[in-house]
Amino acid sequence: MDPTRLIGMSDQSYQPTLAQLRAFVAVARTHHFSAAAERLGVSQPTLSQALSSLESGLGVQLVERSTRKVLITEAGTALLEQAAAIVASAQALVSSAEGLSGELRGTLRLGLIPTVAPYRLPALLPALRDRIPDLSVTVVEDQTARLLDQLRGGRIDAAVMALPALSSGVVELPLYDEDFTLVVPAGHALAGRDDLTPDDLAALPLLLLDEGHCLRDQALDLCRRSGATPDVLGDTRAASLATIVQCVAGGLGVTLLPEPAVAVELRGTALATARFAAPVPGRKIGLVYRSSSAKADGFALLAEIARRAASRA
């Protein structure tokens, strides 16, 4: 039997409303009328009426109702993904329209590199809530290359990363500079120094993040520009600064940290630091977004908020 003809013939002139489709999708996802009504922010009678009208218009039974549970019929299963796609497309239309004003509204999908996210989000997220209280923020932490790929593909709206991004089709807004600090075991010959030069990195057992992390490339570039040849410990693999710091604490070598990470990662350790004389080596962090985006004004505001949050951190 054709599942789309289970309870009668559909009206060929019938056009389902978004409210009806949302009701069906919510019930199918939750298998519960009250939970679906709460998710949509409507009363349960309103939800039930919308679903009944949809079934009547389509001429098929979509769900089986009982006092104990809700079951999706064969017809409901056959039509669910199409209904969900229509609901998602409508929401995408609304989101696109919100972006036409150039303001940040709805949901902001923000990418950050792993050597920035843990140290800047604690100040950035509250600052965003204070300045744009209706904005919903989704955070994506990933390496630079993958963030740029997601940005170009429209899966994120903007990203905070080290500049230059070296990618076409994007706009870069500088945010702030981060100095590099050398982290060494307690008692190390360089501990406490504040007059380091990049030459002092020569022959040090330097621990770096694994391939793909931009901080690794920045540290190696610093050494190359100064002519220093550190003893890079390539057999030690780490995906986070927390792991690298623990390796330093274990006597495996030394490492370079961006200054905002120092207080966080060295908390509770006996490690020491050494700082560079001017000009202090470091990196520039910026906000990157698609040059085709209609939200240039919104991203300019986001950059302003990020700069102020960083200055107060």
Image (cartoon, grey):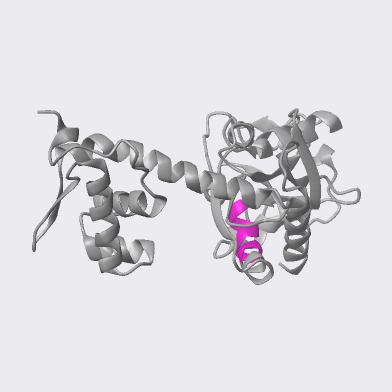
Residue at 16% x, 34% y: name it. 5
Whole-percent x and y of residue 174?
81, 48
Is residue 36 shown left or right of residue 222?
Answer: left
Residue projecting furthest to the right: 278
Q: Is residue 266 above or below residue 168?
A: below
> Considering depth in this image, is 29 or 199 the residue closer to the camera?
29
Q: Is residue 191 visible?
A: no
Question: Is the magenta region chiefly helix, strand or loop?
Answer: helix
Q: Quadrant of residue 122?
A: bottom right
Residue at 57% x, 34% y: name it. 210
Is residue 313 shown left or right of residue 42?
Answer: right
Whole-percent x and y of residue 162?
73, 42
Q: Which quarter shows the N terminus?
A: top left
Residue at 83% x, 37% y: name it. 199
Q: Is residue 90 above or below residue 153?
A: below
Whole-percent x and y of residue 84?
36, 42
Q: Is residue 182 visible?
A: yes
Whole-percent x and y of residue 4?
19, 34
> Considering depth in this image, is 60 or 186 the residue closer to the camera?
60
Residue at 59% x, 32% y: name it. 153
> Considering depth in this image, is 265 or 90 the residue closer to the camera?
90
Start-end of magenta stretch: 116-125
Q: Would you say residue 278 sits in the magenta stretch? A: no
